[in-house]
Image: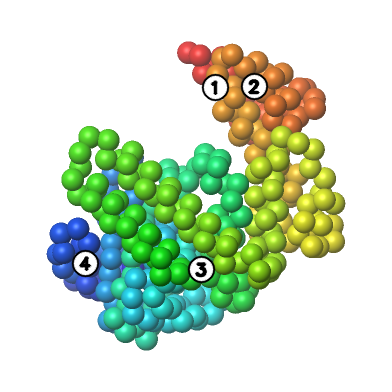
Amino acid sequence: MTVPHKASVAGKILGTATDLVAGQIRPQTRSGTSAGVMPDPRFRLRITVVEHEHSCQMHTHEYSEICLVFGGRATHLTEYGNHPLGAGDAFVINSDNRHGFTDTHKLKLCNVMFDPRQFLSGQRDLHRLMGYHALFDLQPRATHPKEFRERLHLLPTDLSRAQQLVVSMQDETSRHEEGWQTVVHSFFLQLATLLSRCYASQQKHQVTPLTRLANVVAHIQKHFREPLRIEDLARLAHLSTSQFQRTFKRSYNTTVVKFVTRLRLHEACELLKDLNNDVTRAALECGFNSPAFFSTQFKELMGESPSAYRRRQGQ
């Protein structure tokens, strides 16, 4: 894993990195900044497999990570509790999550380091999955110890599939043939989808507050073009209307209404990039009954009117 970017990393060896393609072994001396780990700002993704035999101090970094435990064991340290790790465990660490490891024993950990703005933004199909919202969004930001324990544990067959995707990404990265970034991005999305599906399958008989809220957000992603009543969303979350609104705002730092409005506006931006779509059509297709209200909300978010945005796309 990484160490705090404020600390010096000169000579700091965090573990033994094993290249799954070439079979090489080399020391790890990474920092918590993307400049040191992922120097290409246009493609911020890197994969390592690290064998830990020593503790790793609590730290943060400015990118996200998909963490897959390929073997061994350890204790995962977080601000909200410590949790045992073993082969098959999978979890996501976002940039503001302080974490570390102790009590390590032959811990073989795969880190898929990535910029979520580059690799997850605009993936509408993926965003419709309950498991995606639980694994990539809600669980990394959870503050209750019980929610941290609701982590994904992959079956051997699913862990093997995840390992194959990691090897494929590393192979493409090392060969650097034309189009390699497109192929790596494709494998990354396959990995994210696999983990999201596995999370949903694992939790389908274990309904929890986290999965209920993830179900609501997935429902919003699927039906944002339709009328959405807060009372109906609250029932889907098995909460009263007031409880649901408080829970949602605590989790997403915004109201349900603003969340839905922002989602609709982002979709409208995509429609307006096609000059065959006029402003009224974009408004109606994205769930706004009033083009005037749509224009007001659009300008508040984007800083310009929908018409001006559309004209600028055609320049």
Q: For the residues carrying marks 1 and 3, which lies nearer the camera in this image?
A: 3
Q: CA distance from mark 2 to mark 1?
A: 10 Å
Tell me the residue that label 2 is attached to. 306
Tell me the residue that label 3 is attached to. 152
Where residue 18 is drawn, which disc sits there? 4
Helix, strand or loop at disc 2?
helix
Q: CA distance from mark 1 to mark 4?
A: 44 Å
First in residue order: circle 2 vs circle 1? 1
x, y (%) of residue 104?
34, 83
Question: What residue is shown at x 65% (from left), y 33% (from top)?
Answer: 265
Is the residue 88 above or below the residue 246 in the image? below
Helix, strand or loop at disc 3?
strand
In the displayed structure image, the side of residue 200 where residue 76 appears, left or right? left
Is the residue 237 above or below the residue 257 in the image? below
Helix, strand or loop at disc 1?
loop
Q: For the residues carrying marks 2 and 1, which lies nearer the camera in this image?
A: 1
Amino acid type for the residue under numbered disc 4: Thr
x, y (%) of residue 142?
60, 67
Crowdedness of circle 1 by 10 Å Cα count: few (<14), some, many (20+)? some
Crowdedness of circle 4 by 10 Å Cα count: few (<14), some, many (20+)? some
x, y (%) of residue 51?
27, 74
Amino acid type for the residue under numbered disc 1: Lys
Amino acid type for the residue under numbered disc 2: Pro
Where residue 273 is drawn, which disc sits there? 1
First in residue order: circle 1 vs circle 3? 3
